[in-house]
Amino acid sequence: MKKINYIPFVIILLFSLSIQAQTKQWTLEECIKYAIDNNISIKQTELDTKTADIDKKGAIGNFIPSLNSNANHSWNIGLNQDPTTGLLRNQTTQYSSFGVGVGFDIYKGLQNQNTLRRANLSIVAARYQLTKMQEDVALNVANAFLQVLFNKENLKVQQEQRAINEKQLSRSEELVKAGSVPKGDLLDIKATVASDSQRVVAAENSLLISKLSLAQLLQLKEFYDFDVTDNTSAKDENNILAQTPIAVYDKAKEQRTELKIAKTNLEISEKNLAIAKGGFQPTLQGFYNINTRISYADVISGFVPNLSNPTSVIGFVEGTSQNVLSPNSIPVLGSSPTFKDQFIDNKGQSFGVQLAIPIFNGWSVRNNVERSKVSLEKSKIAVEQEELTLQRNVYTAFTDAKGGLNAYESALSALEARQEAYNYAKEKYAVGMMNSFDFNQSQTLYTVAQSEVLRTKYDYIFKIKILEFYFGIPIIKN
């Protein structure tokens, strides 16, 4: 039985898969989704939302009692006070102490409540900021995507024009040999082909640069094999131009993220003012502590008579001057109680409340309130400014979209006329009724008209998407 060698088939399969991977063409939706998932600025903004979540946890922690423990071990040399008996003793010993304390706010001028509300608003603002960043990236990607499409189409136009002129050059060479046209016409055609080659190189460079710009927005490292596909339409599919500017503006006021951010920042400024005013109010705190002490020094377990000096004079009887004697005794030292017994027997507790009434603090609270008032006024002005900016942007986008449509339709009409003029010039040139210079002029105008159609087409598409964006229609559907 003949043995089959599968190696060539495997190589062909791998090569075909490699070719398919290299020729993958990205749609606008794929580009935007990939950019949103990988853009560095978006990742940084996502970290800001995590920071806001952490701040909220800290605000919640203000309502939870604080619990702290402490431990201490010391060596005392010479005359020191025994912490377990309170007596002064001249010796070297060791002591340990342990304690646990609980503290909690009973009333703090509603600062903790307002801090939590501010933290919740900060989370909302951070999420709005993330949405705003995603929207900005989507717009930038759409603009770069359409620029790539324009450069691709423009390159095709230049290549097709060069191919036409190259054919014309071959035909002119035959006509010159036949003596039908002068040699000067051939030189003009050669110059035209050379100019076409320059325009092709320039178009190729523009396409490469536009691909690089789009690849950088997508955080792609390899852009030479990167390509896109044209799935866009130069049509007002959502009939957005049928709306009025005021209708688009009213819709934008309800949905635009930048206005939501400004309004949320206004609410945050209001909470900051409430927190600052809380500094004028008294604070009441509760506390509870428990501690214990352990001494490792020997303790006095009893007394025995002092046989070498059994008595000592402690006074005398008034009138007789007779000495008053007292028996002398010697303390008997014993081992200290066990660690467990001392830990239990020497414990102590304390609890209570602490009231603090602010009287004068160098105007620090007052200054904080004044600063918060200024910030609040700035936030109000920011909201008004954002509304004015949004109104201007909406009316500008509406006007640009209408102008873009008119420019595109005019470019189509101009192209149709230029094409007819070019076809007529081609017929006249073919029968020798037009010289090469005039024919090249007609051809150049036709090429310019083609490029202008492409430019106005993608410019119109982008302006329509901006207007839809303000109306609340996403660039891509989720």
Image (cartoon, rainbow, N blue to C red):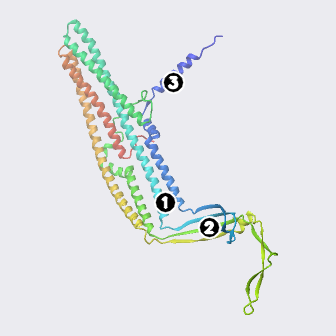
- Classify mark 1: residues with Cα within 10 Å, few (<14), some (14-19) or many (20+): many
Can you give x and y, in whole percent of width and height, for residue 338 in the image? 75, 64
The residue at the point 41 percent across, 67 percent down is 362
**How far is disc 3 from disc 1 in space, using C-alphas?**
56 Å
Labelled disc at residue 116: 1
Whether label 3 touches label 1, CB < 8 Å: no
- The residue that disc 2 covers is 289
* Viewer-side label of 3, 1: 1
Whether label 1 touches label 2, CB < 8 Å: no
Question: Which amino acid type is marked by label 3?
Answer: Leu
At numbered mark 2, what does the secondary structure look like: helix, strand or loop? strand
Question: Which amino acid type is marked by label 2?
Answer: Asn
The residue at the point 61 percent across, 65 percent down is 101
- The residue that disc 3 covers is 17
Can you give x and y, in whole percent of width and height, for residue 27 in the image? 42, 33
| Quadrant in which residue 180 is drawn | top left
- Classify mark 3: residues with Cα within 10 Å, few (<14), some (14-19) or many (20+): few
Q: How many numbered circles are shown? A: 3
Residue 417 visible in the shown view: yes
Residue 49 lies, with reference to residue 238, above or below; the image says below
First-in-chain label (2 vs 3):
3
Residue 98 lies, with reference to residue 182, above or below; the image says below
Whether label 2 touches label 3, CB < 8 Å: no
Q: As drawn, which residue projects farthest toward the front?
A: 321
